[in-house]
Amino acid sequence: MSDPPPPGRRRVQGGSASTDVVLSAHHGANADLFAQVMALHVPPGARVADVTHGQGVFWRRVPEGRYRLFASDLATGTDCRALPYADASLEAVVLDPPYMEGLLRPKAATRAGTGSHRTLRDYYAAGGERAAPGGGRWHQAVIDLYLAAAREARRVLIDHGILVVKCQDEVSANRQELTHVQIISGLATMGFYARDLFVLVRSNTPGVARLVRQVHARKNHSYFLIFQKVPAGQELSRYRTREVPLASSPAAG
């Protein structure tokens, strides 16, 4: 924090007027927005674990070599709720688990929302050995997954480290579920400061199978939520954004 100006001197604000800024709402693809999110919130050279990496779609617009990327997911044998990294060893974590209960139905062509709670639990149970934390059903199982992964992310992040979370609201069992609000509230109780929020609007029109009568707006947007780890012992309500330090953490395992 800078010192206050001497008595009698007026504070002179720095910077210059500009319209070249990162905006909070975007139309387009994940990769385009993700590159802007990372450039704004994670400094070059940071150790970043993408714990639900998949095909690496998010990273297609990020310059190669900008970060020390550790990519993993269930296909590589790594569960986002049990990471192989030491405590406080990473500057950033990226989390994009299945955020709708139907996305994990065996047939890839099946529309989201028509799958089963059991499919979600089985897929994230490592062959049935690890039950979904909290034992939640339907949409709650999705929230349980996010919260368990966030707890693990907090363990491996350095103080003031960044957690990037992708999510989408949904209607589950005829109930409106504001997933992004539930995640923000849940992570606040863990000691994560909600640093930023981005809205990504689909460039195409989502389809609906067998529509009889519409009672909820069809979701055509998703979110990137940016959280910062508040050090233990600090009050979340008094926390202020900090730059992510790079020199204070050991190499990731």
Image: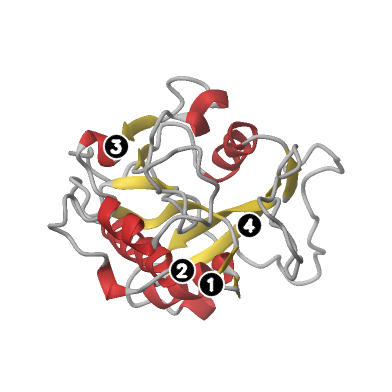
Image coordinates of residue 222 in percent, x first then y, are 63, 52
Q: Earlier in the sequence, mark 2 or mark 3?
A: 3
Secondary element under disc 1, as helix, strand or loop, is loop
- Compare residues 3 and 89 and report the one nearer the observer: 89
Q: Which residue is mark 3?
A: 72
Q: Residue at x 58, y 57 (%)?
A: 168
| Disc 4 crowd, CA 10 A, few/some/many (<14, 14-19, 20+) | some
Query: Which label's residue is closer to the chain start, 1 or 4?
Result: 1
Q: Are marks 2 and 1 in contact (CB under 8 Å)?
A: yes
Q: Nearer the viewer, mark 1 or mark 3?
A: 1
From the viewer's perspective, is the residue at label 2 or at label 1 nearer?
Answer: 1
Residue in the picture at 26% in, 35% down? 75
Q: CA distance from mark 1 to mark 3?
A: 32 Å
Q: CA distance from mark 2 to mark 3?
A: 25 Å
What is the C-alpha distance between the residues marked 2 and 1? 8 Å
Residue where numbered disc 4 is placed: 197
Marks 4, 3: nearer the viewer: 3
User: Of the residues under marks 1 and 3, which one precedes in the sequence?
Assistant: 3
The kind of residue on which mark 4 rests is Leu
Real-space Cα distance between discs 1 and 4?
A: 27 Å
CA neighbours of label 1 inside 10 A, class few (<14), some (14 to 19), many (20+): few
Quadrant where the C terminus sits is top left
Query: In the displayed structure, would residue 55 be above or below residue 180?
Result: above
